[in-house]
Each structure stands twice: as structure tokens, then as C-alpha cells.
Image (tube, rainbow, N blue to C red):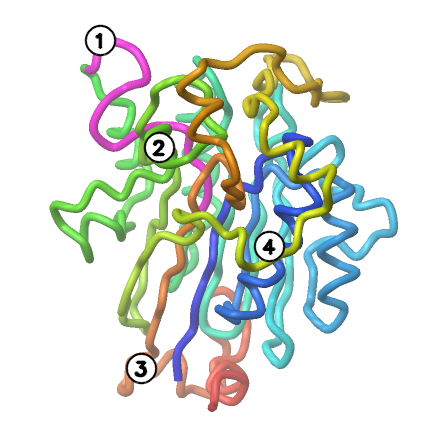
């Protein structure tokens, strides 16, 4: 029995949005993650996902997708796994919050930390996430952290913003733990045609604090073109030639976001965009967990540290 968690920033841009969502649905059907954690979800994409996955539990069951207005975090849980959701507001000027997915034996938090030159805001958001997850002995925090593990976005590179991860006491950054020496860049302009300027960053993270689980694997998802998964309309084929990167949300944009495409792009970027469909401007991460055979938490008929039945988890994950 295994438990898998997929995290991906879906990219709010209009560029091939519907086609990218169709491709994402094919990826979900192929990988069959236990939990999907998405960031930068806009209402129209939320509706498309919910309509296509009616048997999956969704963190937002409202008709108007109120929790992702104008955009936000959203989670889906595979049929057969009991789940509860909690949305915790965070200090933000960009509609950011922490979403908890509580399944038996595990709490998965997903977050999209503040964008742009806001390291102090990101640090405070991490501090609040740490406090919320502190009571859980089996927890994950996944999502777009908006800082790299080796350098800051701009000099100086000391102090390194990545040091803020120390606020997540007892959590481990899973990528370097399982894949030491591999860069694991999830935002890479050399591979992804949706990024207009040179940038290679490991923005997306999987942080784990686990007593009852063993981490088996972590890998990139969506780091290769996915044209073979969906048939594009003539209009979508035309969109492959359009400039990719929109203006990022600016501080203070609580109510609305400018989704217009930028009017210009570099010749090199436009050239590498030709004919290539990706899920997002980010790559995702898929984590595989295995319950420990001797785990009292998961085998107990009582409650696990975050309040759900461990026996129910073993039952729901039985293959």
C-alpha cells in the first residue's frame, strides 16, 4: 500500500488554460495521486476540475469556488479516502492561505507563499504555518514557497531566505534528502517555454515531519511536453505562439488580478515555445509514502495526533 501526494502551481495565466487543465486531468488519471494539492487555482479552472472529478473530494464544494477568488489553493482527495479540509487565512496582500487536508494518519498542508520581494511576509506566513502544524506528528507542508534553496532572487545572497525553513521545526526538506546532488528546479526557463526571462529556481517544496510513514520517492511532474495527452483545437495551436508570461500579482491585489498576457517576449523564448504544451510555468512534485509496518499511530483504533482514525487510513489505502 502506498500514499502519494501531488503538488503543483497551476499558473493563473490564460495561455492555453483549458488545454493545460485537460492535460492535468490526464496526468491525474494516470498517476492517481491520493491527494492533489494545487496553488494559483482560478475559479474557471476549479470548475473544470470539479466537473471532471465528481467522485473526488474537493476542498471547495461551493458553486462559485469562493475559496479561490480571485485565485487560491485547492485540494482533491481520491475516492475511498476519508478527508477533512481546513482553510487558514494568512497575513497577505495576495490572497494567500494555508489549506489543510486531514486524512487518517496524516495532515497535508498546502500553501502558496507571498510572491515577489516580500521575504518578511513569507517568513511570517511560514511561522504561522509552523504553529498550525505543530500539534501534528505526521504532517507535510507542500506548495510554492517562492524562494530557492541555494540563492536569493537578487543579491545579496546572505542571509539566505531559505534559512526561514528553520521555523518548521522537525520538518525535513524532502528533495535533497531523497535526491542529494540533484538540482530539482521546479521553475526552469531553459526547459519551460512559459517563462520569459532566464530563471532557474527550486521554488516548490515538500517538507515532511513523519513518525508513522516512510518516504519512498519524490520526483518532478510536468517537466516534459505533454502534447500527446490532449488534442488541441486550431485556436489552441495558435496560442502556442503567443507570449507566455503575464504580470505577476502586485501587493494589494486582494480583489482582482490582471490576467492579460504580456505583449512582448524574447525571440529565443518564443522560438522554444513552438509546439510545446506544459502543465504550468512550474513543474510539480509527486511524493510517495509508505506506512511503517510497526506504526502504532496507523494501526491504533484510536485517534492520530491530528484527530482522525488510523485504522480508517489502513482500510482506505488497502490495495
Relative to the observer, which residue lies in front, 51 or 192?
A: 192
Q: What residue sits right under mark 4 in the picture?
A: 23
Percent position of residue 153, x then y: 32, 17
Of badges 1 and 3, the one in the foreground is 1
15 left or right, relative to 111: right
194 left or right, relative to 206: right
Q: Which residue is located at x 60 percent, y 13 percent? A: 250
Of badges 2 and 1, the one in the foreground is 2
Q: Are marks 2 and 4 in contact (CB under 8 Å)?
A: no
Q: What residue sits right under mark 3 in the picture?
A: 295
Q: Residue furthest front?
A: 234
Q: What residue sits right under mark 2 in the picture?
A: 188
Q: What residue sits right under mark 1 in the picture?
A: 156
Boundaries of the magenta span: 142-157
Which label number is shown at residue 93?
none
Q: CA distance from mark 2 to mark 1?
A: 21 Å
Q: Which residue is located at x 13 percent, y 50 percent? A: 180
Percent position of residue 201, x then y: 32, 30
Task: Report if residue 145 lies within the magenta region.
Answer: yes
Mark 1 or mark 4, which is nearer the start of the sequence? 4
Q: CA distance from mark 3 to mark 4?
A: 37 Å
Q: Are marks 3 and 2 in contact (CB under 8 Å)?
A: no
Q: Which residue is located at x 71 percent, y 66 percent? A: 53
Q: Are marks 2 and 1 in contact (CB under 8 Å)?
A: no
Of badges 3 and 4, the one in the foreground is 4
Amino acid at each position: 500500500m502506498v500514499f502519494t501526494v501531488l503538488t503543483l502551481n497551476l499558473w493563473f495565466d490564460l495561455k492555453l488554460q483549458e488545454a493545460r487543465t485537460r492535460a492535468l486531468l490526464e496526468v491525474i488519471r494516470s498517476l492517481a495521486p491520493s491527494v492533489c494539492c494545487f496553488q494559483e487555482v482560478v475559479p474557471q479552472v476549479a470548475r473544470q476540475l470539479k466537473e471532471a472529478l465528481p467522485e473526488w473530494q474537493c476542498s471547495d464544494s461551493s458553486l462559485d469556488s469562493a475559496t479561490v477568488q480571485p485565485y487560491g489553493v485547492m485540494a482533491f482527495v481520491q475516492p475511498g479516502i476519508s478527508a477533512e479540509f481546513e482553510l487558514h487565512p494568512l497575513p497577505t496582500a495576495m490572497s494567500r492561505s494555508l489549506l489543510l487536508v486531514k486524512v487518517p494518519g496524516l495532515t497535508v498542508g498546502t500553501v502558496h507563499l507571498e510572491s515577489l520581494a516580500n521575504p518578511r511576509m513569507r517568513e511570517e506566513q511560514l511561522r504561522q504555518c509552523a504553529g498550525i502544524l505543530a500539534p501534528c506528528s505526521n504532517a507535510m507542508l507542500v506548495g510554492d514557497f517562492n524562494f530557492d534553496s541555494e540563492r536569493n532572487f537578487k543579491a545579496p545572497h546572505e542571509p539566505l531566505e531559505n534559512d526561514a525553513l528553520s521555523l518548521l521545526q522537525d520538518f525535513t526538506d524532502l528533495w535533497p534528502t531523497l535526491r542529494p546532488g540533484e538540482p530539482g528546479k521546479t521553475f526552469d526557463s531553459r526547459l519551460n517555454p512559459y517563462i520569459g526571462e532566464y530563471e532557474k529556481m527550486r521554488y516548490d517544496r515538500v517538507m515532511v515531519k513523519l513518525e508513522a510513514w516512510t518516504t519512498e520517492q519524490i520526483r518532478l511532474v510536468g517537466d516534459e511536453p505533454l502534447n500527446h495527452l490532449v488534442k488541441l483545437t486550431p485556436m489552441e495551436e495558435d496560442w502556442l505562439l503567443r507570449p507566455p508570461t503575464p504580470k505577476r500579482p502586485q501587493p494589494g491585489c486582494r480583489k482582482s488580478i490582471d490576467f492579460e498576457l504580456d505583449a512582448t517576449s524574447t525571440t529565443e523564448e518564443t522560438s522554444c515555445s513552438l509546439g510545446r504544451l506544459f502543465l504550468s510555468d512550474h513543474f510539480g512534485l509527486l511524493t510517495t509514502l509508505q506506512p511503517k509496518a510497526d506504526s502504532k499511530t496507523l494501526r491504533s483504533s484510536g485517534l492520530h495526533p491530528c484527530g482522525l482514525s488510523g485504522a480508517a487510513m489502513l482500510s482506505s489505502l488497502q490495495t
